[in-house]
């Protein structure tokens, strides 16, 4: 892969330098200092939580395991990497820098975090780092004007970033195939998860988010993160929301399956999938994402009606909040260096916030789509006891076929999620393209 990345990486760094020049000028800063950050220590313990490098650091470099290191950029100069390579026989020491990216940096190797901070330039510094854990010897200031500018522009992925997101999608879809196979073989949620990790060739800590692996009713828990060790007597349905990472970039993929012989639930899955593909096709420049989300409510209302779950019109199902019972989350979110990427609500490069449409508190993206943005498209229909109980006491309850609801409850729910790039022409569906490539 690195062969292909080399020609993309040089212009990527040129773009980041331009953005940093502007962001620093806006805040009147001389230097941009980006900490990889250091691991967070567990309370009253000598163990750390898994290390996750600052996404701003990963934007510059494909280094996900470089605690204590820094990227230093001073406009007009080549970016610097201050790389911590400790003298340590207890842990694996990060390998000396090598690969397609090293030519773009002046690299200084130091032995300790303290030596790294001592090597940082003085002057007016924008220090992008977490406040916790504090890095001794340097104070993070995370200037809002700098962050706003950088976050806004992080929405527009460079060709280099898109290539890494394709790789993350390939790893994810390869693992999804293995998970489906494990489900069809009658594995437990735990067993399916193990098959997923093995096929992704990633450990849990390397994944961009905690996988959701739910059999039967567990599909109705939106963020179900238990892993039952024993399989249920009968596996009727399977919802898996799981991604993979590539050099710090994320994929976020959901599929839902029905076991053989469960034709009615399979038909509902097919309808949600058809709707989902329609929404993905609308990832086009100029499309308002919140309008697409509202459109999804109408289309899903029609799906519920076609399958006999509701008797009312799509319009009144949306108006009365009935669709929110069955589709109680947002249509999707920006994705990139973080699974829920930055700037989903940002009004412009100076900050600001675009509010969510009223009555849609969980939508994570309120912007108009533009070329270079990558968003997820993840509609769902669920049979969630808590929300169904609330619906039972509303006037709209008479428009629901409760016997049909009861027939679907043992299947939990359906979500289908792809990662889609907005381009100047047709959308690029990273997930579908990757599934097409795995056997
Ligand atoms: N996997 C988290 C999400 O879909 O947003
Ligand atoms: Mn998602
Ligand atoms: Mn997801």
Image: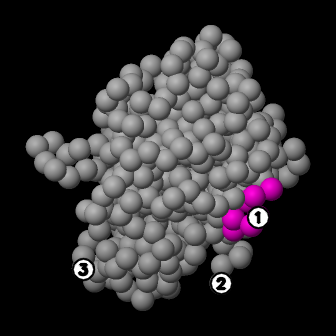
Front-most of residues 215 and 335? 335
Residue shown at the point (71%, 76%) measured from the top left: 437
Residue 72, x across and y down, in percent: 57, 33
Task: Reply yes or no: does residue 209 show up in magenta.
Answer: no
User: Taking 209 as reference, is 285 left or right?
Assistant: right
Q: Secondary structure at mark 2?
A: loop
Of callouts 1 and 2, the N-terminal one: 1
Q: Which quarter of the picture shows residue 274?
A: bottom right
Of callouts 3 and 2, the N-terminal one: 3
Q: Is residue 44 visible?
A: yes
Q: Which of pointers 1 and 2 indicates the residue nearer the eye?
A: 1
Q: Which of pointers 3 and 2 indicates the residue nearer the eye?
A: 2
Front-most of residues 317 and 258? 258
Residue shown at the point (67%, 53%) measured from the top left: 101
Label placed on residue 439: 2
Q: Looking at the magenta stretch, what is its main secondary structure? A: helix
Calculate the distance from the C-alpha at mark 3 to the C-alpha at mark 2.
28 Å
Of callouts 1 and 3, the N-terminal one: 1
Residue 79, x across and y down, in percent: 65, 37
Q: Secondary structure at mark 1?
A: helix
Calculate the distance from the C-alpha at mark 1 to the C-alpha at mark 2.
23 Å
Residue shown at the point (39%, 37%) measured from the top left: 115
**Please, which residue is most extreme toward the bottom here?**
185
Span of residues in magenta: 1-7
Q: How busy is the neighbourhood of tag 1: few (under 14 within 10 Å), some, or many (20 plus)?
A: few
User: Taking 333 as reference, is 53 left or right?
Assistant: left
Q: Which residue is mark 3?
A: 230
Q: Which residue is mark 1?
A: 4
Q: How busy is the neighbourhood of tag 3: few (under 14 within 10 Å), some, or many (20 plus)?
A: few
Is label 1 within 8 A of ligand 2 (CB to nearest ligand atom)?
A: no
Front-most of residues 123 and 339? 123
Look at the numbered discs 1 and 3 and tell me whether their residues touch, using CB distance below 8 Å: no
């Amino acid at each position: 892969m690195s062969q292909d990345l080399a020609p993309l990486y040089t212009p990527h760094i040129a773009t980041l330098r331009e953005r940093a020049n502007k962001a620093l000028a806006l805040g009147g800063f001389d230097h941009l200092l980006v900490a990889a950050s250091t691991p967070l220590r567990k309370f009253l313990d000598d163990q750390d939580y898994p290390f996750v490098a600052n996404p701003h650091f990963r934007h510059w470099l494909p280094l996900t395991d470089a605690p204590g290191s820094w990227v230093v950029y001073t406009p007009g100069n080549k970016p610097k990497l201050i790389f911590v390579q400790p003298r340590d026989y207890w842990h694996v020491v990060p390998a000396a820098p090598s690969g397609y990216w090293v030519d773009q940096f002046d690299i200084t190797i130091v032995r300790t975090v303290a030596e790294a901070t001592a090597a940082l330039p003085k002057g007016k510094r924008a220090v992008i780092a977490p406040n916790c854990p504090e890095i001794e010897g340097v104070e993070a200031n995370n200037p809002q004007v700098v962050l706003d500018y950088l976050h806004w522009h992080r929405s527009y992925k460079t060709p280099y970033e898109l290539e890494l997101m394709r790789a993350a999608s390939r790893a994810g879809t390869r693992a999804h195939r293995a998970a489906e196979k494990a489900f069809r073989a009658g594995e437990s949620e735990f067993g399916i998860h193990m098959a997923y990790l093995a096929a992704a060739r990633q450990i849990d800590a390397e994944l961009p988010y905690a996988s959701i692996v739910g059999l039967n009713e567990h599909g109705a828990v939106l963020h179900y993160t238990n892993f039952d060790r024993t399989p249920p007597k009968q596996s009727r349905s399977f919802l898996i929301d799981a991604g993979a990472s590539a050099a710090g970039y994320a994929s976020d993929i959901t599929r839902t399956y029905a076991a053989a012989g469960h034709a009615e639930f399979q038909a509902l899955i097919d309808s949600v999938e058809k709707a989902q593909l329609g929404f993905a096709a609308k990832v086009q420049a100029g499309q308002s994402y919140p309008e697409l989300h509202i459109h999804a409510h109408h289309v899903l209302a029609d799906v519920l009606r076609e399958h006999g779950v509701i008797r009312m019109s799509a319009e009144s199902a949306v108006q009365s909040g009935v669709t929110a019972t069955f589709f109680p989350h947002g249509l999707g979110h920006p994705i990139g260096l973080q699974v829920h990427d930055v700037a989903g609500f940002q009004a412009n490069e100076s900050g600001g916030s675009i509010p969510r449409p009223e009555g849609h508190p969980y939508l994570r993206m309120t912007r108009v789509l533009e070329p270079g943005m990558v968003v997820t498209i993840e509609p769902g229909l669920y049979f969630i006891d808590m929300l169904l109980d609330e619906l039972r006491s509303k006037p709209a309850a008479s428009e629901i076929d409760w016997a049909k609801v009861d027939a679907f409850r043992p299947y939990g729910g359906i979500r289908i999620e792809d990662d889609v790039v907005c381009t100047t022409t047709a959308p690029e569906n990273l997930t579908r393209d990757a599934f097409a490539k795995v056997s």
